[in-house]
Image (tube, rainbow, N blue to C red):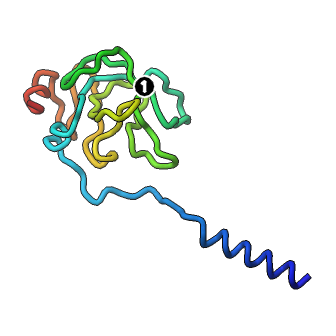
Amino acid sequence: MKKTTFIAGLLLFYFTISTVVFACEPCSTTLNLRETVEKSDIIILGQRTDYSPGIEPESIKVNVIKVFKGDVGQSEITVNSWNGMCAYGIVVDDKKYVIFLEKKEKMYDAINSGCSVTTYPFENDLIDIDGDEVSLSEFMEKIE
């Protein structure tokens, strides 16, 4: 009995210290709008097409409404959303957003692992840039 308890304790200790836990790391620095634009492969006005409240998949489908920068070549793209339990990608509902993306192997992803500007809400033909609502043409001027 003592031997079994000892072995069980050793196994528990081994598995406890050999398990590596990766927590969601906060951004040490975040890129501003200018830096995000420079690093973006594409900047689009898009809307998530596969939204279901309470469900956060690893990737999402986004309908491309307008392209501000880059070449998409398709009307719907796949975008990284969650990496495990961490929201390092683009996490949006079914509303329209300006989205800043870089091309990965088979999908698009947030710039700098999400440590950048990721999205701006678009409503009533205006883009909300940190409380400052601008038109599409004003936005184009800001990113050029």
Q: Residues within 10 Å of mark 1 (few under 14, many from 20)?
A: some
Q: Indicate the amino acid at tag 1.
A: Asp
User: Where 4 falls versus 72 (above or below)?
Assistant: below
The percent coordinates of residue 5 (x first, y second) are 84, 79
Name the residue located 43 percent from the left edge and 37 percent from the top edge. Answer: 81
Q: Residue furthest bottom?
A: 2
Q: Where, quadrant-wise, is the N terminus in this rendering?
A: bottom right
Q: Position of residue 60 (x, y in %)?
A: 45, 29
Quarter that holds the C terminus? top left
Q: Is residue 77 left or right of residue 85?
A: left
**Can you tell which quarter of the image residue 111 is in?**
top left
Point 86% across, 78% down: residue: 4
Compared across the picture, whether 103 is left or right of 125 comes to: right
Question: Is 97 on the left or on the right of 138, as rendered?
Answer: right
Question: In the picture, residue 42 is in which quadrant?
Answer: top left
Residue at 76%, 78% in the rendered image: 9
Q: Is residue 36 above or below residue 60?
A: below
Picture quadrant of residue 91:
top left
Q: Residue at the right extreme?
A: 1
Residue annotated with mark 1: 94
Q: Residue at left 38%, top 33%?
A: 105
**Vertical arrangement, residue 49 with respect to residue 21, above or below:** above
Question: In front here: 141 or 53?
Answer: 141
**Circle 1: element type:** loop
For residue 74, above or below residue 9:
above
Asked whether 51 or 144 is in front, the reply is 144
Number of numbered tags placed on the structure image = 1
Q: Position of residue 16 (x, y in %)?
A: 64, 70
